[in-house]
Amino acid sequence: MASSTNTENDGPHAFLPDFCAAGTLFVVLVVAELVAIVLSIARLEAGGDFLVTLSKTSLFLIWIALASTAVMCLLRKTLEQLGPTRTFVVSYILLLTLCVLLAELSYRLTDQFGTAAIIEGSHQHFLLQTFAISAIVIALVMRYLYVASEWRRSIVLEAQSRVSALQALIRPHFLFNSMNTIASLTRTDPAKAEEAVEDLSDLLRANLGAARDRTSLKQELEIAAIYQRIEKLRLGERLSVRWDVGDLPMRAMIPSLTIQPLLENAIYHGIELLPEGGEVVVSGREDGKFLEITMSNPVATGKHRAKDGNKMAMSNIRQRFDIAYEGRARVSVDTDDGRFAVTLRFPMEEQ
């Protein structure tokens, strides 16, 4: 019914949408107004004033919609502790009861102060009519909420599975080259070989053992730096990485395994294809409530890998950022001046 924010509390196991969100409130009000229009048309008699009937009906239904949304906003976390089936059953009964109580209150106010709302027939007829219409509308809305919630959960779970796959994905050529490098260092420089083994162990632990969808920018940059050190042992002077991220808040949160795959692509699709190597530049800045991180590498003109994993990585990161920030983040690519640059722009959220 509306997109709920993807926070720690609103994970894939949430059964109900975020009724406190502005998007949910907007959709609820739209549904209430559509019902008001249908009821006004059904009640319209020859010579009647449609706009007057619509305004009074809208007042009553919007009152119910606002009250229902407020109650669901307050009780959402409590209701979801009941489990999916009980959550929707209890929510249905709760909303239906609330509608009847508001209808009773509306009838008494109207009887006391005048025709401020559409009241037709006797007291019992009005309550039964409100009960019947509310039962049908709430059932349809709850069904829609359930389908939308399941769709949302499937999208989030798919994104999490992609993250898990990315965490478990260490390119075979990287492991092969790293082990060969370590093997050669054991004979020429045992101290460096030991450092390389420790770095490789830390990198594997970070990739295979990450449990959260997001991590701090400091941890993300540390993982990328470990990867750089391992590749530096293999490529030597051909690889140079310049980090210009001193102005970034290190406590800011970012989707896990974002920087390291970008650095891996920059080396694999850029530096390795150049006989003389090149420099990867990682820069970052704070722009109001947003952070921007740009990674650029030289392009090997006329050379490319048989498998274009670069596009796959970009698609994966874009999807994860869309789900994490719901349209507030942007992943853009620029290929001007003989360099391939990826820019991440996302809201600053500290842990």
Image (cartoon, helix red, strand yellow):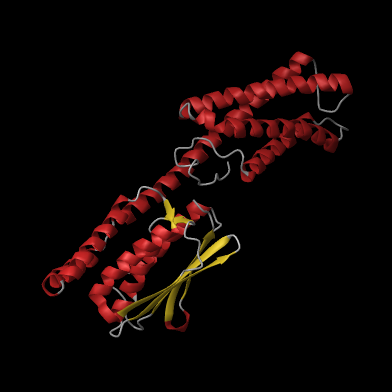
Residue drawn 21% across the image and 67% down it: 178
Comparing 188 with 318, the one in front is: 188
Left or right of 218, for residue 304 = left
- Work out whether 170 lies above or below 29: below
46 or 134: nearer the viewer: 134
As rendered, which of 85 and 324 lies closer to the eye? 324
- Is 77 or 253 nearer to us in this picture? 253
Compared with residue 293, is residue 303 higher up or lower down, i.e. above or below?
below
| Residue 101: image location, x then y, percent | 70, 20
Left or right: 97 in relation to 159: right
Quadrant position of residue 306: bottom left
| Percent position of residue 115, x then y | 87, 25
Q: Residue furthest front?
A: 191
Q: Quadrant of the N terminus?
A: top right
Identify the residue shown where x is 50% and y is 31%.
Answer: 80
- Can residue 66 be spotted in the picture? yes
View extreme (bottom): residue: 276
Relative to residue 83, is residue 186 drawn left or right?
A: left
Residue 175, image quadrant: bottom left
Q: Residue at x 46, y 30 (%)?
A: 84
Left or right of residue 143, residue 98 in this image: right
Q: Can you give x and y, in whole percent of width and height, for residue 213 in the image?
A: 41, 50
